[in-house]
Every structure is written in structure tokens, then in C-alpha cells.
Image (spheres, rainbow, N blue to C red):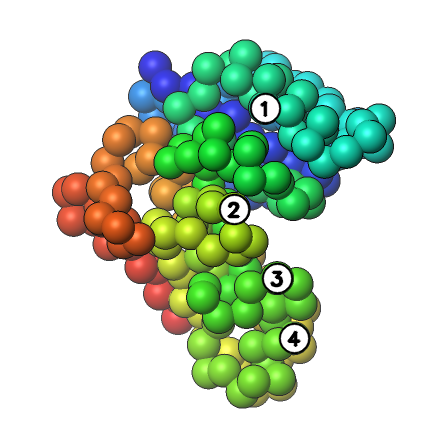
Amino acid sequence: MKNIVIAISGRGSNMEAIVRACESERWDARIALVVSNRADAGGLVFARERGIATAVVDHRTFASREAFDAELADVIDAAAPAVVVLAGFMRILTPGFVARFAGRLVNVHPSLLPAFPGLHTHRRALDAGCKVAGATVHLVTAELDHGPIVAQAVVPVRAGDTPDDLAERVLVQEHVLYPRAVRWLAAGELRIDGDVVHHTRGESQLLVAA
């Protein structure tokens, strides 16, 4: 059975969705550890209530990003993960950390990458007049919000949408898309050709919401 480690900084609603999917769909994998850089992260409570091991590596106690990332990587490696999931983990990771987990480190970003990397994605999409928005699950590389795209979800932009409206609609789809992508990666069902990720059995890597 494959081990999955999930890193969070707050409530971790995507973590919750992944845990629930793993349980209900009976993956040949388990959530071995939920780790946070904040001791007060709400998602830690959720994990503990389900008997999942938790750990805290407080970034504020380290003199450098490199020192924090080295300790975080050691904690994660102790769980022998096949997949490392960033689920609202609000730290920029060093190239050394990313290289250590290359090919098994995934993130979800609330835009249709490569459009709108970084912050304030929903406001930027509205300001640009986009007719659709969405979310992207991607393999993590040293470049922020880049890396081979595993799957995307598309949602319509509606007249009168605020950034909060759009964020809520996108998050609903993230809770479907991210567990699916994590399951694929844990099951070894993805093939990477250069920067293009294919599902080996032809499952759709695109989720379109009405």
C-alpha cells in the first residue's frame, strides 16, 4: 500500500477531500501523515480525529528557508511517501526540497495555468475579462506555480461574479479534481512525456463544470 503525505498551513479543505476520497473509494494507498508549518492549523484536528499521524515543523524556529525545508523533508521522508501533496501549504519551497521529491510532489493552483500564477488569481481573471476560470493540479518544479499539468477543472465566469463568488465555485471543483489526480499518481497511472502528463488508461484529465 502506497503512503501519501499531505502538507497544510490552515484548514486544509483539499486535504479533507483527499482523505475522504481515499477512504470512500478504498484506494490502494493511505494518508500516512499530515504535516503543517503551523501548530494551530485546523486541518491537524481533522486528521487526528481520523487517526492519521500529524506533525508540525514551525518555520519560525529556523534561521533560513533551507534549514526549514531540510527538516520538513526529513519529517516527510520518515513516512516513506509515494506522493507528497501540497494542500494550502503557504510556503515557497526551495529547489533542494523540490528536487528531493521530484515526480511525486503535487500542488493545486486556483487558475488555469499557465495563466495567473501567484496570488489574487480570481480578481486577475475577472479584471482580464476571462469567460472561464478554474484550477490546475500540477507536478511541482522549482519555478513557482509551474510544472507539468496533471489535470484541470474549468468553471464558467458569470455576470456579476466577485472574486469570492469565483473562488467558491472553483474550490468545489478542486475538491473533485485534486483527489482524482492524487489517486492517479499514487496508483502509478500517469506517464510524463517531456512536460506533458498523460493518463495511461485514457481517463479524462479535464473536468468541466456547468
Question: In what element is the residue under mark 4?
Answer: helix
- Which amino acid does the dot numbered 2 rest on? Ala
Q: Is 146 rendered above or below residue 42? A: below
Gap between marks 2 and 3 measured at Cα = 14 Å
Gap between marks 4 and 2 measured at Cα = 25 Å
Question: In what element is the residue under mark 3?
Answer: loop
Along the line of sight, the residue nearer the viewer: 61 or 18: 61
1 or 4: tag closer to the N-terminus? 1
User: Are the residues tagged 4 and 2 within 8 Å (C-beta)?
Assistant: no
Image disc number at residue 118: 3
Q: Where is mark 2, residue-wise? A: 142
Q: Nearer the viewer, mark 4 or mark 2?
A: 2
4 or 3: tag closer to the N-terminus? 3
Q: Quadrant of residue 40?
A: top right
Can you give x and y, in whole percent of width and height, for residue 36 in the image?
69, 30
- Left or right: residue 126 versus residue 130 is right
Q: Where is mark 4, residue-wise? A: 123
The N terminus - image quarter = top left
Image disc number at residue 73: 1
Gap between marks 4 and 3 measured at Cα = 12 Å
Question: In what element is the residue under mark 2?
Answer: loop
